[in-house]
Amino acid sequence: MPKNSSLQLLKLAKPYTGIILLVLGVSLVGNGLSLFLPKIIAQAIDTFKTNNFILTVFIRNFSIFISLIFVFSTIQSVLQTYLSERLARDLRSKLINKISQQQYLFINQITPEKLLTNLTADIDNIKQVIGQALVQVFASIITIVGATVLLISINWQLALVVITIIPLITAIFVFIFKRIRKYFLRSQTLIDNLNKVINESIIASSLIRIVNSQEWEFLKFSQISGEARQIGLSILRLFASLIPLIGLIANTSVVAILLIGGRSIIFGTFTLGGFTAFMNYISMLIFPIIVLGFISNLIARAMVSFERVNQILTAPVEKIYGNQEKEIKGNISFKNVDLTLNHKQVLKNISFEIKANSKTVILGPTAAGKTQIFYLLAGLLKPNKGRILIDNKPLFDYSQDCLGRQIGLVFQNSAIFNTTILENINFKNKNDKGEVQKAIKTAEIKDFIATLPDGLNTKVAERGNNLSGGQKQRITLARALAINPKILLLDDFTARVDKDTENKIITNLEKNYPQITQILITQQISSAISADQIILIMEGEVLAVGTHEYLLKSSVEYEQIYNSQQSLI
């Protein structure tokens, strides 16, 4: 276990010092009382032998101790559960807060699947250690120390035989613990991959059935699941060898005690009650050692989980936005912009100008770099080189809130939330009611909403599964328009609506939002014909800029696209 990671994990418990000390105090009392039970039994045996045994006294004393142990154990259990859940809640809040501060590129590189595992399985492993295992370790140490002291007080010669097994068992734990950590690290990575495969299989379930690829998806799952099984079996084999080794050592010491202790009883140098108490204390000594063995499993897993969670918690947050608060007009400039993602250059020396209140279409084939320009304009990505200006000021000089209030975004993949249609459109409930109604009319969803039993208050299913692709896209358009933006970014937003609806939406936009800067990302030349400006991009480079008529005459590539799509215009 890396020392620094261990210290950092313990630092997580610092805000809960008070409740941890309370739990440890309750545990100390409860386990301390348990150590007296063999003494009570030993005294009863010895007094019975001398005819001084009083049953009522024994029952009274035994009942008091048992009742007190029950009460303190119950309090300890309740406090441990509270500590565990509070820790998990706070840690998840910290993690979510840190994730929300990170940029889009960071989230994509870490992957949502890993972040999901961090928020669920990893935090569950950590809370088990701090909320449960920490107290169990303390209780086990108290029991081991107490039992050892009492063994010595009863018969120090026999106690030495028992004490010699502790270093042997400790050495076994250390040996196994060192080898098991790498398995847990691999195990958590496999959980990430399993989450990814399961998520993809659920989302694409209809496609999988249509193309009859269930067997292929099952094989993908089985491969990762099989590897996880092998890792699990390797961990189990290590721990399976632990218990027999401990049992062998413990039973060997018990045999030695029986031989030596039995001889002492025969010769009268050891009472039967004392020997019974001695044997009980051996059991009390060995059991917490076995418990520590199982807890080492939890600690090993939790250390791996903590390192994964700590990677997110300690990741630097890149402050890319400024503090500029200003109403923007909508003039946009790209000046020699380069963008590299995953060690691959996707945009090369991109330059263009967009005037306020104009309609610009960024046109190009698949993988041309159009969506990356969209993300740059939205402030989700930062260029490696060059500048992006809005009204002659660098985009990232503006505050994030300032841009969010004035730039409407419609992504290619519609982001729909599991709430009402109204809450999906009036996001965060910040927009004027009149603006919301205007946005609904412009996006051509008023008639669709009127057919719903609860209208705008109709609940949307998870990922919008009770909506068509076109309905989802129009809802996201209404959401973008509801803020009454100065700039509207549309990434292939008409791909899932019919031509008639698309024409109505375009007409509505020109009528209801005449003072807006529209930027449409598309592959369809039909959407570009009426634009004030068309920017043709291929393989991350700008090939041509101009109106439809101008490009037909000056750009061979544009003419080829036009001719190939004439039947769709």
Image: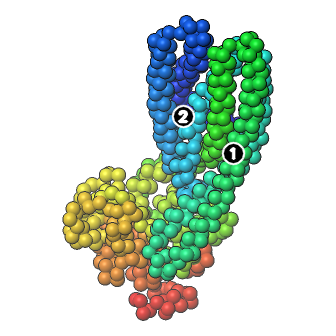
Q: Amino acid at mark 1?
A: Phe
Q: Does the image show residue 372?
A: yes
Q: Classify residue 124 as left or right of residue 186.
A: left
Say which of 296 and 288 sits in front. Answer: 288
- 437 and 352: which one is in front? 437
Residue 483 sits in quarter:
bottom left
Q: Nearer the viewer, mark 2 or mark 1?
A: 1
Q: Which residue is mark 2?
A: 131
Circle 1 residue: 239
Seen at 25% across and 59% down, the residue is 457
Q: Residues within 10 Å of mark 1 (few under 14, many from 20)?
A: some
Q: Position of residue 290 (x, y in %)?
A: 66, 35
Residue 416 placement (x, y as % from top left): 38, 62
Of the 4 image quadrants, the one containing the C terminus is bottom left
State left or right for residue 62 relative to residue 416. Answer: right
Q: What is the secondary structure assignment of the residue under circle 2?
A: helix
Res. 8 in view: no
Earlier in the chain: of badge 2 and badge 1, it is 2
Where is residue 313? Give x, y as percent.
59, 44
Q: Please count the marks in the image.
A: 2
| Residue at left offset 58%, top offset 66% | 221
Q: Is residue 59 above or below residue 128?
A: above
Labels 2 and 1 touching (C-beta < 8 A): no
Up the image or down, 528 lies above or below 377; here it is below
Three-letter code for the amino acid on which mark 2 is drawn: Gly
Kind of element beneath mark 1: helix
In the rendered view, does 547 fall on the left or right side of 285?
A: left
**Nearer the observer, 507 or 280:** 280
For the point 34% across and 62% down, which residue is it? Answer: 461
